[in-house]
Image (cartoon, coloured by chain):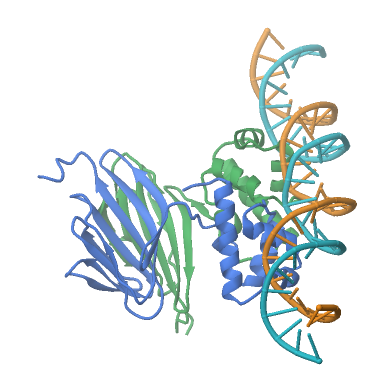
Chain colours: A blue, B green, C orange, D cyan
Amino acid sequence: MVQAWTPESAVAMGRRIQRLRQERGLSLSELARSAGIGKATLSGLEGGTRNPTLETLYAITGQLGVPLASLLTEAAGEVRGAAVTARLLEVFEDATATTELYWLTIRPGRVQHSPAHPAGVVEQLTMIAGAARVGPRGAERLVRAGEHVSWAADVPHTYAAVSDQEAQASLLIRQPHGEADATT
Amino acid sequence: MVQAWTPESAVAMGRRIQRLRQERGLSLSELARSAGIGKATLSGLEGGTRNPTLETLYAITGQLGVPLASLLTEAAGEVRGAAVTARLLEVFEDATATTELYWLTIRPGRVQHSPAHPAGVVEQLTMIAGAARVGPRGAERLVRAGEHVSWAADVPHTYAAVSDQEAQASLLIRQPHGEADATT
DNA sequence: CGCTGCTGTTCCATATATGGAACGCTAGCT
DNA sequence: AGCTAGCGTTCCATATATGGAACAGCAGCG
């Protein structure tokens, strides 16, 4: 988990604020006024050229109606595909395997194709909200909120939300080490 | 979720920082030095008399090894028990349920007892490294790295590493809303 | 055309967050 | 006892985050 204040993370946070503001149809001036902060502050924040205090951030998130945490979620390690955004939460490595934990957001209306991983890689997905069809191509399974599924990820596989709403899931990708791998 | 910058929330956040620091056996001076911030800043923060910038907060959470979000949520980001440390990675809330995603570290040699959660709460655990016996008291199951288990958490349940090594796992706690639950 | 009302950006005086230094304190040691 | 090394707090000069004002650009309108 990246934990640093960098120009990049500032820019990423600025974009997030701007997106939230525009989704609500607010102008920069409007939001600044209703949040009780200066336009210069908000402008600079969205541009990623400021290092805001908590007070300022709370004033903004309060007006946007989102938790402050939603501005912080690390864009680092975020992979965006056709239908899936995968945010890396944790990596754990020991003698036997490397495990990566992702937070998945699956947008409706499209299907995400993922290529085969190396032999031995297993994916485990737990649906948190919504529902999706996931798994090896041709053997996808329907997973609803609260359900769990795992599959060998050494073949092409897909992700697709089934309703017209975004689905949320956690995804563990486990890659064993010391494999006499691939061509075995 | 608190959505304002008040003296109270500042004090609460200060207490969280202090707790995390003390759990790690760090003095205020040590943490300030390793985080590259002034002692005065950290002292004031813990006392709740400051309004920190993101840069300052990231410097601190980076040293403490916790996500910044864990300083913001009232439901303390990290819960330390006899054998288990649970670090909150994500919270997701929709119309039907609240889901919390934790990173669990299970220390060997002790058994962690967890009281019953409200009716409807389900826990799902995926072992990432090591092995543990987990589940409702009297019906614990052995889970090895790569395996997944889920159980209704409305009864007392336990966690215990089985080898003499720390075990790592991801834990999802799902609490449905709008239940005709409990006291009906 | 000018005028009005909005947009988002930049400039800059002011408010304030920061961190070094000095402080009082306790613990361990000679 | 004195001396040293650590602790956490407070003081205060400096760095910097803030927000009002001025700015340029654009759209609608007479």
Question: Quarter holding the N terminus of chain B?
Answer: bottom right
Instruction: Identify the residue at image location x=72%, y=59%.
Output: A41
Q: Nearer the viewer, residue B19 or A46?
A: A46
Quick one: which residue is furthest to the left in this view? A184
Picture mark count:
0
Q: Nearer the viewer, residue A5 or D21?
A: D21
**Relative to B148, residue B93 above or below:** below
Instruction: Identify the residue at image location x=18%, y=41%.
Output: A179
Q: Nearer the viewer, residue B92 or B134?
A: B92
Q: Quadrant of residue B156?
A: bottom left
Q: Is residue B133 visible?
A: no
Where residue B142 appears, as percent x and y from the top left, is 25, 54
Could you tell whether B42 is left or right of A175 in the image?
A: right
Where residue A97 appears, as percent x and y from the top left, is 27, 44
Could you tell whether A135 is left or right of B33 in the image?
A: left
Q: Is residue A170 visible?
A: yes
Q: Nearer the viewer, residue A23 or A136?
A: A23
Where residue A155 appears, as percent x and y from the top left, is 18, 58
Instruction: Identify the residue at image location x=20%, y=38%.
Output: A178
Instruction: Identify the residue at image location x=70%, y=54%.
Output: A53
Could you tell whether B28 is left or right of A121 in the image?
A: right
Where residue B102 appears, as percent x and y from the top left, is 43, 57
Q: Quadrant of residue B154?
A: bottom left
